[in-house]
Image (cartoon, helix red, strand yellow):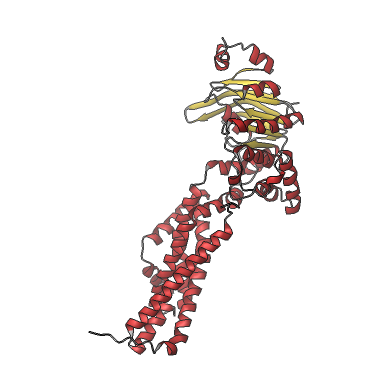
């Protein structure tokens, strides 16, 4: 039984069809990496799963929550899938703790005391318990991204979407963020990540999806996809002859 | 030619002057609080609100920003009674200031909202907040922080502009000054005193607004 069922999804921006019929089923606990050139539609696909983009055809169902573009369905969908962005998108006027508490209190109406307890737990989980009172401005990029992960986790999602979450980081900060993701994967969190970290994809992911021109071009276990790319496009992307 | 300054009238006129100051302060406090609140609501409509409401707010904003404050005041105080809507001088003055500041602050706050990175709305949405919750809890405070200096200036401008409410006999500071100089025939001294009071009020108001900004918006611990 799949947790995320993406069926024949098509998405157009004007005349430009960016997703040309995507079907992927993701099982609970799977860690899926989506790779591909820029413009291949991988970020758009991820954003569709969270309802940040509407879809023109097909269906997306996450644990029984169907993606329909109205407020009630969007909320149900977004409570099940968290999202982490390339640019962190922390709320600049709130402390790290405040960032993690806000949506619990606003969306779930959690009392402040409980929200704070959850926030402390989640920040501890990403190794930032001591930064509870720090503003985003006072944190490094890697720390900001870890707060963003804590913020998503505080909503207790059953899956996390990661949109190139290390691409805006200085190279020496990438490892600390990936370490957190690796831990989440080990704990059984379902993860769908658009990434350029091929080593990480190979080590941690259970499946790799190679997208090309709005289609799933190749899909399979990382050993197969990386070691035996079948199509010339993937071979070219991976830089192997 | 020598001019003999005479401030001897000042003591006797103090009660009138103080009442004028009180009315002017009252006008600006009510005007600023409700004007800015109304402006924020209008800014929300123009930036993110329902489509059908946008032209209504846009019309209001353009109407107010392209007509003189004095005419708006006359319209409310002398015009509206023809429709059976009557109010005291002070109520009319308050209303005119709220309506006027509402329109200007709408545009200032809207600029702050529209300068918000798209990622902030998306982060709010991805955490299952409704668009209004994202606006209220995520976007609004940083947007106000961005435009706080401009908004503060506009509030001071409206405070100084409140001098014209004396034209409908609202008994503000300017009304008091006019009244006093018509009795003591010391126009020069009277307007020197009222000018200095306006200057002091404006400086005080700026300081208060700066302090309010300091309280409302987070700052780095270091610095």
Picture layout, residue B47 above or below residue B87: above
All told, the count of numbered labels is: 0
Outermost residue toward the front?
Answer: B223
Judge whether residue B82 can be spotted in this image.
no
Q: x, y (%) of residue A180?
A: 70, 33
Q: Residue at x 35, y 82 (%)?
A: B189
Q: Left or right of A74: which side holds B57?
A: left
Q: Left or right of B179: which side holds A75?
A: right
Q: Nearer the viewer, residue A205 or A14?
A: A205
Picture layout, residue A171 above or below residue A219: below
Outermost residue toward the left?
Answer: B1
Q: Residue at x 59, y 30 (%)?
A: A171
**Image quarter for residue B200?**
bottom left
Q: Residue at x 40, y 76 (%)?
A: B196
Picture layout, residue A160 above or below residue B175: above
Q: Nearer the viewer, residue A172 or B71?
A: A172
Q: Nearer the viewer, residue A120 or B142?
A: A120
Q: x, y (%) of residue A237?
A: 55, 17
Q: Nearer the viewer, residue B3 or A197?
A: B3
Q: Residue at x 72, y 44 (%)?
A: A129
Judge whether residue B142 can be spotted in this image.
yes
Q: x, y (%) of residue B122?
A: 58, 41
Quadrant placement of the N terminus of chain B: bottom left
Q: Left or right of A223: which side holds B79?
A: left
Q: x, y (%) of residue A83?
A: 64, 36
């Amino acid at each position: 039984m799949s947790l995320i069922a993406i069926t024949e999804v098509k998405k157009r921006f004007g005349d430009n069809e960016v997703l040309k019929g995507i079907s992927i089923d993701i099982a609970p606990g799977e860690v899926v990496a989506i790779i591909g050139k820029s413009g291949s539609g991988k970020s758009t696909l991820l954003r569709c799963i969270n309802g940040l983009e509407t879809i023109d055809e097909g269906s997306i169902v996450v644990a029984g929550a169907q993606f329909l573009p109205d407020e009630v369905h969007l909320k149900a969908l977004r409570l099940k899938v968290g999202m982490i962005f390339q640019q962190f998108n922390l709320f600049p006027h709130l402390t790290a703790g405040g960032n993690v508490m806000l949506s619990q209190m606003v969306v779930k109406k959690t009392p402040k005391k409980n929200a704070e307890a959850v926030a402390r737990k989640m920040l501890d989980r990403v190794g930032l318990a001591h930064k509870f009172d720090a503003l985003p401005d006072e944190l490094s990029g890697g720390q900001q991204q870890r707060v963003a992960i804590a913020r998503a986790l505080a909503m207790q999602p059953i899956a996390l979407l990661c949109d190139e979450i290390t691409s805006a980081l200085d190279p020496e900060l990438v490892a600390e963020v990936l370490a957190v993701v690796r831990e989440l994967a080990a704990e059984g969190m379902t993860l769908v990540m658009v990434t350029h970290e091929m080593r990480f994809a190979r080590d941690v992911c259970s499946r790799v999806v190679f997208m090309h021109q709005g289609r799933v071009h190749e899909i399979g276990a990382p050993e197969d996809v990386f070691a035996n790319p079948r199509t010339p496009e993937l071979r070219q992307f991976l830089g192997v002859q | 030619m020598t001019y003999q300054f005479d401030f001897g009238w000042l003591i006797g006129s103090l009660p009138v002057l103080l009442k004028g100051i009180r009315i002017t302060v009252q006008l600006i406090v009510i005007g600023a609080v409700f004007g800015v609140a109304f402006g924020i609501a209008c800014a929300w409509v123009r930036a993110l609100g329902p489509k059908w409401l946008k032209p209504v707010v846009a019309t209001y904003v353009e109407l107010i920003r392209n007509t003189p404050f004095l005419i708006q005041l006359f319209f409310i105080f002398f015009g509206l009674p023809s429709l059976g809507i009557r109010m005291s001088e002070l109520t009319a003055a308050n209303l005119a200031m709220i309506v006027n500041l509402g329109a200007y602050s709408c545009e200032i706050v809207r600029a702050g909202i529209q300068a918000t990175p798209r990622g902030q709305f998306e982060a709010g949405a991805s955490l299952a907040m409704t668009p209004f919750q994202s606006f209220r809890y995520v976007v609004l405070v940083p947007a106000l922080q961005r435009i706080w200096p401009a908004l503060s200036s506009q509030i001071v401008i409206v405070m100084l502009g409140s001098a014209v409410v004396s034209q409908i006999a609202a008994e503000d500071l300017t009304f008091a000054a006019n009244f006093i100089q018509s009795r003591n025939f010391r126009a020069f001294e009277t307007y020197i005193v009222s000018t200095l009071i306006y200057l002091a009020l404006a400086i005080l108001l700026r300081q208060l607004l700066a302090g309010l900004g300091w309280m409302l918006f987070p700052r780095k611990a270091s610095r």
